[in-house]
Image (tube, rainbow, N blue to C red):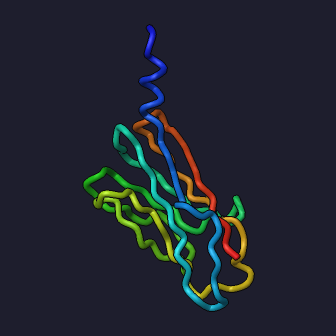
């Protein structure tokens, strides 16, 4: 069928950390790591995970539907969820508290949406 692949593109899950992909923080301060996602067909049991340097999981959350806020599955004690998913923007941002020099590195916001045949997408932000 012609136009069928055009339809699949519309389902695209997108994840974004905003205009800049680098955040600077002072030692011992709190730093916001922004992340939002968009999906054309909505989501069900969406899973999002924040990773530090690709391997260390620092926040893991699940969102049942657009009508509910995320619930925590697991997290690093210094990480606080500051986003909201019942608002307009599907905001899954976190705050890293009492930043240390060892926290510098790559932070990846990863989203998986079972409603889109488990579509996965991520965005990366660098903390200096």
Determine which quarter of the picture holds residue 88: bottom left
Q: Is residue 13 above or below residue 97?
A: above
In the picture as drawn, the residue positioned furthest to the left comes out as: 67
Please report the residue visible at 72 percent of the width from the left and 70 percent of the height from the top. Answer: 105
Please report the residue visible at 51 percent of the width from the left and 67 percent of the height from the top. Answer: 34
The percent coordinates of residue 45 (x first, y second) are 39, 48
Q: Is residue 111 above or below residue 80?
A: above
Q: Nearer the viewer, residue 49 or 34?
A: 34
Determine which quarter of the picture holds residue 86: bottom left
Quadrant that contains the C terminus: bottom right
In the picture as drawn, the residue positioned furthest to the front comes out as: 19
Please report the residue visible at 71 percent of the width from the left and 64 percent of the height from the top. Answer: 53
The percent coordinates of residue 33 (x first, y second) are 54, 70
The percent coordinates of residue 31 (x first, y second) are 56, 80
Please report the residue visible at 54 percent of the width from the left and 43 percent of the height from the top. Answer: 120
Q: Nearer the viewer, residue 72 or 26?
A: 26
Q: How many marks?
A: 0
Quadrant that contains the N terminus: top left
In the picture as drawn, the residue positioned furthest to the bottom comes out as: 28
Left or right, residue 46 beside residue 66:
right
């Amino acid at each position: 069928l012609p136009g069928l692949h055009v339809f699949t593109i519309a389902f695209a899950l997108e994840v974004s950390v905003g205009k800049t992909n680098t955040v600077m923080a002072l030692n011992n301060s709190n730093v916001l790591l922004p992340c939002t996602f968009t999906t054309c067909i909505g989501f069900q049991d969406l899973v999002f995970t924040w990773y530090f340097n690709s391997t260390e999981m620092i926040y893991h959350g699940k969102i049942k539907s657009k009508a509910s806020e995320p619930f925590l599955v697991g997290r690093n004690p210094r990480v606080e969820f500051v986003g909201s998913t019942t608002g307009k923007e599907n905001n899954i941002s976190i705050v890293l508290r009492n930043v240390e020099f060892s926290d510098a590195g790559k932070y990846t916001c990863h989203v998986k949406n079972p409603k889109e045949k488990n579509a996965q997408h991520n965005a990366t932000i660098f903390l200096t």
